[in-house]
Image (cartoon, rainbow, N blue to C red):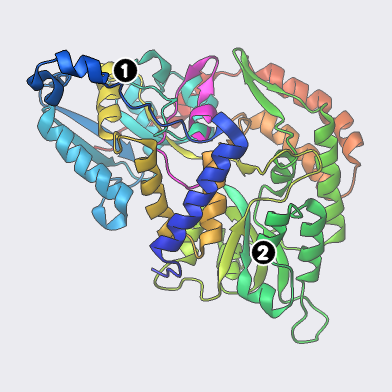
Amino acid sequence: MKNKLGKKLLAAALSAIMVFSLAACGDKGSEPAKAPEATPTTAAKATQAPAATNTPTPTPEPVIDFGGRVFKIGSYYDMTPSADEGALEAALADRIAEVEQKHNCKIEFVNLGGDYVADYVTSVLAGDPIVDIGYVVTQKLLPSLIEGGIAYPLSKLPALDLSEYKWRSDVVEAGKYKGENYAMLLKDPEIRYGIFWNRSLFERYGLPNLYDLVDKGEWTWEKFQEIAALGNQDTDGDGTIDLYGFNARENLAWCYLYSNGAYVANKTDAGIDINLKDKKVVEALTGLQNFTQNVKFRDAIDWSKEGWDSFIKDFRDGKYMMCLEEFWISYAYLNKADSGMTDDWGWVPFPKGPSATDWSCYGKENGARFILNGVEKPEDVALMYDLITDLADTNEEWDELMEDKLENWCDDAKTAELVAYIYNNKLAVINGVQGFGDLNSAINNMINEVSKGSMTPQTALETYQSSIDAAIADISNHDYNAEMQEYKVDEPAQ
């Protein structure tokens, strides 16, 4: 795997950003370290027997015996952790083996294949869940699998404290619905959308260093637009752009909204509420329209000759200066030992809008874990999962596991620093509206009118408000039981 930074350099960058994060953002970052246990005073020690002073009585660990139960964790692929994948996976593999031996159980990872969601639904409706814990994408979970009775509320299980440092806060928040939690995910640095940039091409064509702009507070929508336009190059002089400054496979509009603090979708105890009246929304849509109408960039895949990941591959191959993508492409495409990116690359958050107070990291969805409804003793399932995910005793040890991940995923220390800032300060946010089909479509139809310049933002908001309101009203009337029947298959995977 391509790796251009040493561990000491990365550790220094992470340490600096974590100190800065805590100083700048107070309790939004890492949880404070636990205070050391109080020790007896000198006078008190003098009155104590030596044995009591030197040999504190340990708190006995509760005896947990799962009675030989086989716990099954399922996905569309085999999620068995491998020590070859890094320190976090190695720690998870070791911890699973320890829990199996210590607590009399077996953890089995089940490959359900591509119909995994249908298998969840079919088996739960038949009264025999195919696995205890399943992988699921947040927009599939919320609201369908929750309203359809397939997901069990995690907040009813005392063993799971989802406020603990080991859980990803954005995924936990994304899995909240009507006052209950349904989703969890072990902490990792796989944050969502940001701007990947080709550092080699930027230097070759004399474009500003994006890291410098971030550090100076000058990474704004206006500067982004300027650089995207300057990055368009006609390298062979035929009058056609053959090196683009920017591509956006999807979600550019939503990144504009979130990077201006316009979060739009708010979940409530009754479901979801949409607020399009905030001035930040008009501001964001105006910024979007200004960009789309004044900068030539790629945002539409030609399906006759391109695949869904063609923009990613073309960025990797030096055909784009910048690329709007989720951070997972760093290890899946850019840092691969074979056919990886040969140019130097970097990552920065999406630029700030005029009303933003900090960086944002928008995500349309995220993979999560959930407990299937109807499993035997769900409290034991929760306890098992809590036990196998106890990989570190302190937040600092968790940060070391994150450091190891970032060392393998990043091309330079500055990318690691910025990614750490995002997850330490809980700036990654997953869109809550994606799973509500009609509502999501209504909002995106409005956004598309703005993006293509056929309506002003204010006119589009006024025009589409009634269809958005109708879609919200229809949520309570949606027949989720019928939707679950559409998922059913004759024979779930074994």
Q: Residue 43: x and y, percent?
A: 23, 16
Residue 296 visible within the image: no
- Image quarter of residue 58: top left
In terms of depth relative to the viewer, which is nearer, 407 or 50? 50
* Residue underneath mark 2: 322
Q: Quadrant of the N terminus?
A: bottom left
Q: Which region shows up in magenta? A: 170-190
Q: Observer-nearest residue: 66 or 411?
A: 411
Q: Which residue is mark 1?
A: 374
- Identify the mark nearer the N-term, 2 or 1: 2
Name the residue type under label 1: Gly
Q: Secondary structure at mark 1?
A: loop
Residue 17, image x and y in percent? 54, 48
**Side of 451 where 179 appears, left or right:** left
At horizontal 21% and vertical 38% (from top left) the residue drawn is 96
Q: Please determine whether, in this image, residue 463 is positioned above or below residue 246.
A: above
Q: Residues within 10 Å of mark 1 (few under 14, many from 20)?
A: some
Q: Are marks 2 and 1 in contact (CB under 8 Å)?
A: no
Q: Position of residue 440 (x, y in %)?
A: 67, 33
